[in-house]
Image (cartoon, grey):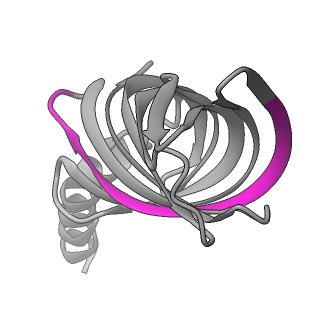
Amino acid sequence: MKNSVRALFFIAAFTLAPALQAEEPKYNYYIGAGYSHIVAEYNNTNLFEDSFPGGEIYGGYQFHKNAALELGGFFTGDEDKQTGAVSTSFQLAGFYVGLLGILPVYERVNLLGDVGYMFMSKDIEASSGTSTASVDDVQDAFRVGAGAEFMMTDQVGLRGMVHYIYDNSDAIDYLMQYSASVVYHF
């Protein structure tokens, strides 16, 4: 009996040892930067450019294996459009805070979901002949997104995201943001 108990103890010890020595996942800070492209869907107007290439930068803290809090900003170039005698210029910039959901699907691949709140600045200028009008509009908006992340190493990954941005202004129905970036985990 004594030998049976000893044998069971050693079997349990050898079986559980790897699990007990396994490291807990390290939740950490990360930063990222990349290309961002915003497409605008307007309400009953074709005076403005609807495609805005630009960039984004973000940082966050992964506080759980499936969740992170993220802060970031984006900017676009100044896009011009000529429609008849009217010339317009439009530029977007803003920052956001969001909750990022992370679903590991393979060893180095994660599916991502994002819900957040943002502030956005729209710099708009229109001119016709000798008269010019400009508007600098700042507003808040909700955004929701989905994407994927491929970790090339334990610290460096590639991320692709698509965001729907609800715009509650009269001129714009909604915005779609497409982004590809490099992310670095500390």
Q: Depth check: 115 or 107 in front?
A: 115
Residue 178: percent from left, percent from top: 37, 49
Which residue is found at the position 52% from the left and 37% from the top? 27
Residue 99 located left or right of residue 147: right
- Residue 35, image quadrant: top left
Image position of 4 with respect to 88: above or below: below
Which residue is found at the position 76% from the left and 56% from the top? 141
Residue 167 located left or right of residue 114: right
Which residue is found at the position 83% from the left and 50% from the top? 140
Extreme-bottom residue of the structure: 1
Q: Is residue 112 visible?
A: no
Magenta stretch prevailing secondary structure: strand
Residue 41: percent from left, percent from top: 51, 64
Which residue is found at the position 48% from the left and 22% from the top? 77
- Residue 128, image quadrant: top right
**Quadrant into which the C terminus falls:** top left
Residue bounds of the magenta highlight:
134-153
